[in-house]
Every structure is written in C-alpha cells, then in structure tokens.
Image: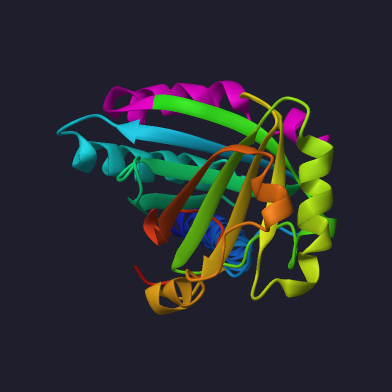
Amino acid sequence: MKLFRLAFIGTLLLLALLLIRSARAHDNDINQRAYSHRDASVTPDKGPFARIAMLRPLDGKMVEFEEGYIRHLEWHKQAHDPWAWYGWTISHGDRARWFVYATFGHASTDFDQAVDPADDERDNLRNVAPHCEFVNSALFEYLPSLSRGASVPSVAPRAEMLTVELSPTAGKAFEAAIRASRSSLEGETLWYRLVGGGASPRYVRLRPRRDYAAFLAGSAAQPLPDDANRLVARTTIEVLTLRPAMSYGLATVSE
C-alpha cells in the first residue's frame, strides 16, 4: 500500500511538472512571435506626430554610451513597448558622432500612453545618462502636402537630415513654397514641422537613402527652391547612419 501511495504521488508530481513546462513553453512562444512580428516592421502609421531627440556621448565614453543604450533598449523589449525607435549616428556634420533617436507615426494621444515612463526614466538614468549629455527632445508633425512618402520613414542604412530655421513669421510662406515644388521631388522626402521643444518655426526634412551613392546623386540639386530659400535664416545638412543594434522594432538592416 505504501509503495502504491508513493507511486501515485510521484505520478501527480510528474504531471504537474509537465503542465508547468508546457505553459511556460506556450508563453515563450507567444512572446517570441510578438517580438518577431514587431521586429519585422516599423510602428504602424497611426498619426502624424513624431519625437526626435539628440544625445551627445561624452568624450572618451563612446563605448560605454553605446553599451548602456543597448541595455536600455532591452528594457523596452522586456516592457513590451509597442513603439518603434530609430537610432542614428550623425556621420557627417558639425555634430558628428552625436546620436539621434526618434519614433514616428503617432496619434496625439500616444504620448500620454507611453509604456511605464517612470521606470523607463529610472533605467535611462542607470544605463544611458552617465555616459552622455541629453541635448534636446522635440515633438514634430508630419506634413504630407509637402512630402513624398508616409509619416514613418523607410528603414534605410543612410538618411539625409536637413534642418531649417526661419524668421518668426515666415512659416506659412515657407510651407507654400515647398508645397509648390512638391511635384519635382525625387525619392522619399519627408517634411516635419516643430510643434514643441525648441525655437520655432523650425522644420526637419528626412530623406532615407540606401547608400552614399544615392545620397550624393541628389547632392547637385539645390536643397530648397528659391522662394523658400529667401525665407530661411539657417540650414543644416547632416548625414545619418542607421544603427540597427541601437534601434528597436525596425526591419533588419545590417550595419
């Protein structure tokens, strides 16, 4: 009888262990499919708003900065963040080696529903802040009538970023001048207007490109039409290099 009871108890424990393993395997499979699906494409285009921010790695801290930022992206993964985050290094420009991170295609309500902002900030302070300067963070609105493409940029190894600053009252005339030249745009060309987080009026134009050859092929053209140039106080053209390991939720692009 005693042996029978022991055998019965052993059978129950074995069944319980198998059920636990099966449940864990099921959960892991669901999570893996969710990450794989999210990594296969960028955030769906839900709206016109974007956040674009810049970090300046401290001198002599580039390796620590990149390692810390990658650890922070792991926090986003563990938190099941549904947003896609682009990570670019400025390869050419006065701010060379600065880091640009951005998220696109958001509705106005999205920024009130970010994943656990308090814990996000704690992890940021632990892993990223010791190795860089937080230079700026701004909100932009995509302008489809000035652009060729969608509010979410294509995932490409390179991108041209043109930043335009205007005199205080020139915004409407500038947009009209860019809109009038829209039919001459070649390739993906995305215009965004600053709506908060810096001196205004300011505009950013992104042009994703597959390589330097594609970027340089269009460099002979004047960056802005004459009617728009007359309204500009300052322009800056920078070349960005996508950093897949420092991005989250994007299609795979080799560095």
Which residue occupies 42% across, 56% down? Answer: 240
Out of 6 and 15, give the one closest to the viewer: 15
Q: Position of residue 180 (x, y in %)?
A: 83, 61
66 displayed left or right of 33: left
- Number of callouts: 0
Q: Position of residue 75 (x, y in %)?
A: 47, 39
The quadrant the C terminus occupies is: bottom left
Which residue occupies 78% across, 66% down? Answer: 182
Asked if the stretch drawn in magenta spans residue 78, the answer is no
118 displayed left or right of 241: right
Residue 19 seen in this snapshot:
no
Q: Position of residue 241 (x, y in %)?
A: 39, 59
Classify 53 as above or below 92. Answer: above
Asked if the stretch drawn in magenta spans residue 113, the answer is yes
Out of 186 and 50, give the one closest to the viewer: 186
Which residue occupies 42% across, 73% down? Answer: 216
193 displayed left or right of 125: right
Query: Which stretch is magenta?
Result: 108-133
Q: Position of residue 56 (x, y in %)?
A: 34, 33
Helix, strand or loop for the magenta stretch, by majority: helix
Which residue occupies 55% across, 69% down? Answer: 221
Residue with the most extreme left position: 60
Classify 68 as above or below 228. Answer: above
Out of 148 and 50, give the one closest to the viewer: 148
